[in-house]
Amino acid sequence: MEVEELKSRLRSLLHQRDMLSYERDSLELFDLIAEIDEEIRELHQKLKVTA
């Protein structure tokens, strides 16, 4: 995956996480946010390696 693709995916995930934060609290929501945060960390790591 190219750097621009990684950046685009990261922006999309950050937006998704931010939109979910406005939803009511639920366990499923917390799980989804945790999953998104993990993917964001992985993308940051990939960007560091490729940049």
Image (spheres, rainbow, N blue to C red):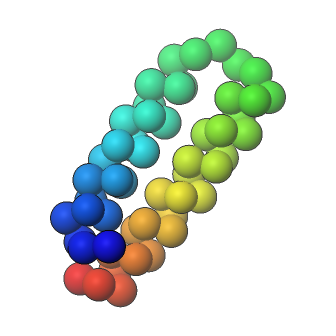
Q: Quadrant of residue 24?
A: top right
> Seen from this angle, which residue lies furthest front?
1
Numbered marks: total: 0
> Seen from this angle, which residue lies furthest right?
27
Q: Position of residue 30 (x, y in %)?
A: 71, 34
Q: Position of residue 38 (x, y in %)?
A: 59, 58
Q: Is residue 39 left or right of residue 51?
A: right
Name the image quarter holding the C terminus.
bottom left
Q: Position of residue 31 (x, y in %)?
A: 73, 39
Q: Is residue 14 left or right of residue 28?
A: left
Rendered residue at 29%/84% (across/down): 50
Say if 26 sits above or below 1 in the image.
above
Rendered residue at 43%/66% (across/down): 43
Q: Quadrant of residue 14?
A: top left
> Seen from this angle, which residue lies furthest top?
24
Say if 49 sits above or below 3 in the image.
below
Rendered residue at 53%/26% (across/down): 20
Say if 51 sits above or below 20 in the image.
below
Q: Is residue 39 left or right of residue 10?
A: right
Q: Is residue 17 left or right of residue 31?
A: left
Say if 13 sits above or below 3 in the image.
above
Name the image quarter holding the N terminus.
bottom left
Rendered residue at 35%/43% (across/down): 12
> Seen from this angle, which residue lies furthest bottom?
49
